[in-house]
Amino acid sequence: MEAQAQGLLETEPLQGRDEDAIASADFSSMLSEEEKEELKAELVQLEDEITTLRQVLSAKERHLVEIKQKLGMNLMNELKQNFSRSWHDMQTTTAYKKTHETLSHAGQKATAAFSNVGTAISKKFGDMRYSIRHSISMPAMRRK
């Protein structure tokens, strides 16, 4: 009941359904002919201004390209610079530093584990080779 009493004084932002209702509402019947003409004139003026701004922006973009060409800047150089800057920015983030530290530590652990496995395998082959040599050299093994 409180919300209904407030009416137009609601402080909550519009929801999607509210925006749809407003967009589909026909306010033209509430406007006088004079107001309609003023709004149409304003609409034409805004469209003209937007067209002018687009033309100005296009001219400035062309001028920007010309200046960059005179300075020897091309798309590939810009991409390299942007990539280098982005890579540097990423490397300075806390998340990257923590990830790098963790992966580096994990790599060291993995290297140590593989080294231990390699040592164990080498030792096992060494033991097997000794066992085979020892077996062959024993006189009991030579009897038929």
Image (cartoon, rainbow, N blue to C red):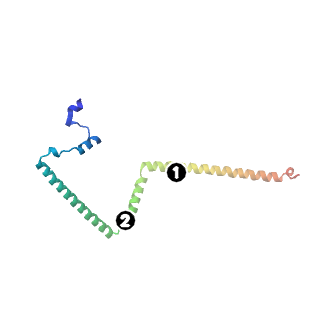
- Mark 2 packing: few (<14 Cα in 10 Å), some, or many (20+)? few
Where residue 78 sits: x, y (%)?
37, 63
Q: Which residue is pictured at 64% across the width and 49% down the height?
A: 117
Q: Amino acid at mark 1?
A: Ser
Q: Is residue 15 visible?
A: no
Query: Which of the labelled discs sits on residue 25, or is there none?
Result: none
Q: Which residue is pictured at 40% across the width and 54% down the height?
A: 89
Left or right for 31, reference 72: left
- Mark 1 packing: few (<14 Cα in 10 Å), some, or many (20+)? few
- In the picture, the quarter occupied by the N terminus is top left
What residue would you read off at disc 2? 75
The residue at the far bottom in this view is: 70
On screen, residue 51 above or below 13: below
Query: Which of the labelled discs sits on residue 104, or is there none?
Result: 1
Where residue 61 sits: x, y (%)?
28, 64
For the residues carrying marks 2 and 1, which lies nearer the camera in this image? 2
The residue at the far left in this view is: 34
Q: CA distance from mark 2 to mark 1?
A: 35 Å
> Which of disc 1 and disc 2 is earlier in sequence?
2
Q: Secondary structure at mark 1?
A: helix
